[in-house]
Amino acid sequence: MGQILLQVDDLHTQFFTSRGVVRAVDGVSLHIDAGETLGIVGESGCGKTITALSILRLVPDPGRITAGKIMFRGRDVTKFDDDEIRDFRGNDVAMIFQDPMTSLNPVTKVGFQIEEAMTAHNRFSASLARTRVVELLKRVRVPAAESRVKDYPHQFSGGMRQRAMIAMGLANEPSLLIADEPTTALDVTVQAQIIQLMKQLNRELGTAMMLITHNMALVASLCQRVVVMYAGRIVEEGPVEQIFKSPQHPYTWSLLRSVPRVDEARKDRLVSIHGLPPDLTNPPPGCKFHPRCPFVIDRCKIDEPGLSEVAANQVARCWVLMRNVKDEDVAAAKASALSLDAAKKLKAEAPPEVGTVAGG
Amino acid sequence: MATAIGIAQQVDWDVPEQTGLWSDAWVRFRRNRLAVGGLAVIIVMIVLAIGARLPATPGGLWHILHITGDPVSQDVVNSYALPSLQHPLGTDILGRDQLSRILYGASISLTIGIVVQILILFIGGGIGMAAGYFGGWVDNLLMRFTDIMYAFPDLLLVLVFVAAFGPSFWSIFIALGLVYWVGLARLVRGQVLSIKEKEYVEAAIMTGTAPLKLIVKHLVPNSLGPVIVTLTFGIPAAIFTEAALSFLGIGIRPPEPSWGVMIEDGYGGIFADPRQVIFPGIAVALTMLSFTFVGDGLRDALDPRMKR
Amino acid sequence: MTNLAIYIIRRLLWMIPVLFFVIVITFGLMHLAPGGPWDREGRQLSPQVVNNLNVKYGLDKPLPQQFLTYIWGVVHFDFGDSLKSPGQHVSDRILQSWPYTFTLGAVAFILLVPIGIGLGVIAALRQNSLLDYTALGLATAAASTPNFVVGIFLIIVFALGMNKLTDGNFYFPTGGMPQPFNPFQVELIMPVITLAALPTAYIARLTRSSTLDTLRQDFVRTAWAKGLKSRLVVMRHVLKNSLIPVVTALGPTFAFLITGSFITETLFSIPGIGRAFVTSIAGRDYTMILGTTILFAVLIALVNLVVDVLYVFIDPRVRLTD
């Protein structure tokens, strides 16, 4: 609908480790419109966080963007010099991180940390920045904002810290706010409040948001469009309602079926997908998901499918597509996922002589 | 935060199969070249030190290595001899063979450094166990005492102890044991406390089972690694302290050739022949460095969380 | 602020039992052990003379009485007469030696803290560079080379070696410390390096690992994500956190300087307290040993108190508890 704000084009981000090259982001292309809310979902380690960090060029060592373009308002972020990237960060695009407990500097006052986000750029004068800190904290519903600006992070609760992080992110009125698992570290009632807040801010300020999460329910409540990532690649993309109604990639289907259990949400454990995402130094041939896919056919093991349009505005990377899977196969997949779970539980409870196999 | 290695490791659906902790540790230790080098130096030094204490039979291995087994025999005509085949590191002011003196000194340093750790294990382990096990006022008292000991420089305390016992090998030995137990006591106490907090131990205590056996059973496998690391780092500290005491003239007395004694001797004649201090000085530094490398290696190997 | 005052007073009061305990241990050790201050190598003093000396210094009284007399003296800041320097008060001897040790220690401290921190920070910011490896290697070597070996090697290279190379025209002198109050004399160079090498290495290693830890923290990434200049990220966010543990290291550093002074002053013939302590240990000068030990105990307790109070000011998370 709106104009394109950010366009990521064939992005490759790789980590050069002693174990080999980890292709954390492997040819990702996506875009986000002004004022839009985009969800990026997938299990941990599928490249969503690294994609976000690549946009801000904050990929940690030994990682590097090796190819691709990141176009923001017609300029390529990957070509920015030191001053340009510095001015881009926190000003055009701001980011909120997963753990509000560790994302604030423990020895500096909260108010100052927000103020600093403004004084780093030239949008607000120093005196205006100081008064804006209180305004921002009020806007994110921090009670008694006037006195809390002088508090240190350890005097804030987890939810309050995340509000402060959001205030920091909004400080320069960025056109895009990236939120990386903004609620994972918080308890459930606080999660709901934070999501409510973000929704409201998006409506009131028109800030585009990119929400990174493994939680499909969160995407449903906040986003207009969703990108599903697996093993560093996009496997499906489309409007949220449509994806929820008719997911075409088996991975999306599995994610939607798996309800993260509240007690294990922090470990990113998805109960019903069996196995692990592939080792990204040595991904499987063909479709990266095929070793875990319940609907795998021979072709999946050799050829990797491309992203193809499966419906209006919806693309998927799959040879099979869920609409072609027979009903009884779907039922069987559900049953087998369940029985695998049951088997695993039995194994864990079995006496050690039987259960453990001596490893190398 | 997704670091490079974290990408693959963060997602462990299955609890990883428990491979042998010790074989794992050995693999990690072997990868540390400095630690392996240090261990090699230490082993060679132990073998030579034992050799220095064995009687030299003519034509035997020790004889060939010019280890006379008698580092005190003097040959005054031959004082300050330059290194030769006869005396690979030369002789000192009294014509005594430097190499055999250094190797004899190694036997003193290594014995003190290594054997004293057993004494430390008993004292520190005992105090730590008692504090953690009994808790309450016992713990309070012992820990206050430990805090006071901890605040004092080791060398100062050892000096006071040695002043009381008089300068000899055994008084240094006991003084080291009485001073260096503090770190270990804190470590063991912490371990005992954390084991006591475990539910199954709490349950056992509530049902009236003697918990001491249970605690010891869990204490040993849990704290063996850190204890070994602490004791290993204790070795260079003890070696340093012995050498420093002897250098200050308050430790082992001449003619017993401890490294500290040799350095003190050589320092007196440093303008005549600096080699007299250079060789024993290198010996102390090399030994301490080797043990430090081994300690570093063990720490990294036994504590997988510390991976760098 | 009142909180802080109460805390400081409590800590100062806590020093009293600690000192009492230190005196008990030292006193007990001195007197229970065989041998005494009148033992000589070679010709022994006659029993009559020994007896007279014991009577003169009160060593013939029962131990508890001696102890109470001593404590009574300490309460009045009277530490008795030195047994080995007849007619000299322990406090006088300490006052004579104090300037040497203070000048040496202060120069070493003022140099070693910034150098140690600087090396550590630079090494961490340039992790895995040649500079990092050099600094780390030097620090590791310095941390496991005994200070007397460091001192002797310095003498060999800069006194003996340079003397020989320059035909006696240029070298570092080793003879003592002619001016006790002058921190700028050439004679101090080698003693200061000897004394400071180990604690510098210790602080550098600690700073490096603490800074590396901090650089990996989430809040540093937050700071970059704000678009801060790298200078501000390092100063405000990295160093402000990574130097907190280094403050804790000041206590051990001070202890290093005390024990280091035993060795350094003996090595370079500096008539300071460290050397006086070593001589009195060797000579079993009970009163001197007790007096200097009490002095060291007070100094260490005060330094630890200062460090703990400093902590409150630099780390807002720290609350004053006991």
Image (cartoon, coloured by chain):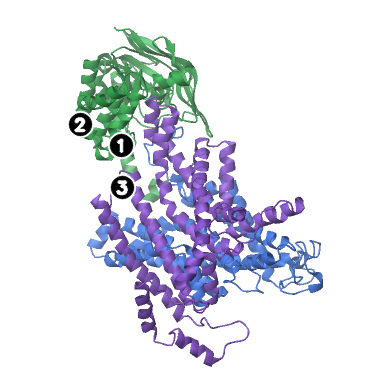
Chain colours: A green, B blue, C purple
The amino acid at mark 1 is Met
Looking at the rendered structure, whether the residues under marks 2 and 1 are on a common chain is answered as yes
Element on which disc 2 rests: helix
Q: Which residue corresponds to mark 1?
A: A101
Q: Which residue corresponds to mark 2?
A: A146
How busy is the neighbourhood of tag 1: few (under 14 within 10 Å), some, or many (20 plus)? many
* Precedes in sequence: disc 2 or disc 1: 1
The amino acid at mark 3 is Val
Of badges 1 and 3, nearer the viewer stands: 3
Which residue: 38% across, 32% down?
A275
Calculate the distance from the C-alpha at mark 3 to the C-alpha at mark 2: 24 Å
The amino acid at mark 2 is Glu
Which residue: 39% across, 24% down?
C227
Of residues C261 and B29, which is closer to you in this image?
A: C261
Instruction: Report the quarter where the C terminus of chain C lies.
Output: bottom left
Kindly indicate the quadrant of the structure image that contains residue A35: top left
Q: Position of residue C71 (x, y in %)?
A: 36, 76
Would you say residue A114 is visible in this rendering?
yes
Q: Position of residue A197 (x, y in %)?
A: 21, 24
Q: Residue furthest left?
A: A144
Of residues B32 and A198, which is closer to you in this image?
A: A198
Q: Position of residue C281 (x, y in %)?
A: 52, 73
Element on which disc 3 rests: loop
- Which of the labelled discs sits on residue C318, or is there none? 3
Mark 1–mark 3 contact, CB under 8 Å? Answer: no
Which residue: 23% across, 27% down?
A134
- The correct choice, above or below, for B126 with respect to A336 in the image is below
